[in-house]
Image (spheres, rainbow, N blue to C red):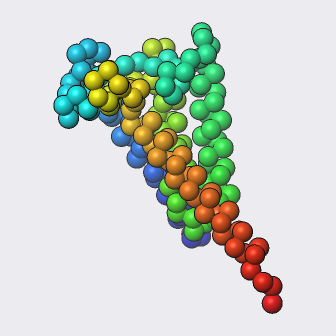
Amino acid sequence: MKSGDSIRRLFVGVAIVLLGADFVTKRIAEGSLLPFPPVQVVGEWVQLRLVYNPGAAFGFHLGPWSRWIFLVIAVLAIVMLYRLSRSSPAADRLRQLSTGLVAGGAAGNLIDRIISSRGVVDFIDVGIGVHRWPTFNVADMGVSCGAIALAISLWMEDARRARAEAAPSP
């Protein structure tokens, strides 16, 4: 087995673990939460509340075709992330981790779009009083953290490339 293959397993492993955690937590939320009232976890700061989001992040909606448009976008994103993983340097663990997080999160929300016309299951509600962040789920956390990590990975690669180009040639 090539070392690059074992490193790239990180992409697949992270994606599968996140997908599993997302699936399980969403089914628990659907089975035990009602839309209102919320279940307080840390006072009013962190609550659990069942919400179905037919749109995208932050409730972004594209009308009656939203479900299908976001379904296609998610499939394309997963394919692009897999290709990015395959084309990345074998030793770039941060790149493999970050692409796995984003792909796993995209897959989690994609499954919701496939199995239900109600939309993506969201259940984590954070905020103070009436000032609330849009309700989210485990997949959304994976996408957000993965996107930040991917941006850091790409920035680090650009910085390495710039240093290599600036180094005096012998």
Judge left or right: residue 43 versus residue 148. left
Q: Position of residue 23 (x, y in %)?
A: 38, 33
Q: Position of residue 35 (x, y in %)?
A: 29, 15
Q: Looking at the rendering, in which quadrant would you find the N terminus?
A: bottom right
Rendering quarter of residue 140: top left
Q: Position of residue 166 (x, y in %)?
A: 75, 75
Is residue 122 depicted above or below 93 in this figure?
A: above
Judge left or right: residue 37 versus residue 1. left
Q: Residue at x 60, y 63 (%)?
A: 156
Is residue 95 depicted above or below 69 in this figure?
A: below
Q: Residue at x 52, y 53 (%)?
A: 149
Q: Position of residue 151 (x, y in %)?
A: 58, 52
Residue sitting at the far top: 64
Q: Residue at x 45, y 23 (%)?
A: 120
Rendering quarter of residue 128: top left
Residue sitting at the far bottom: 170
The answer to whether residue 118 is seen in the rendering is yes
Q: Residue at x 41, y 18 (%)?
A: 52
Judge left or right: residue 33 versus residue 98. left
Choose between 3 and 155: the one closer to the eye. 155
Choose between 43 and 24: the one closer to the eye. 43
Residue sitting at the far right: 170
Is residue 116 depicted above or below 141 in this figure?
A: above
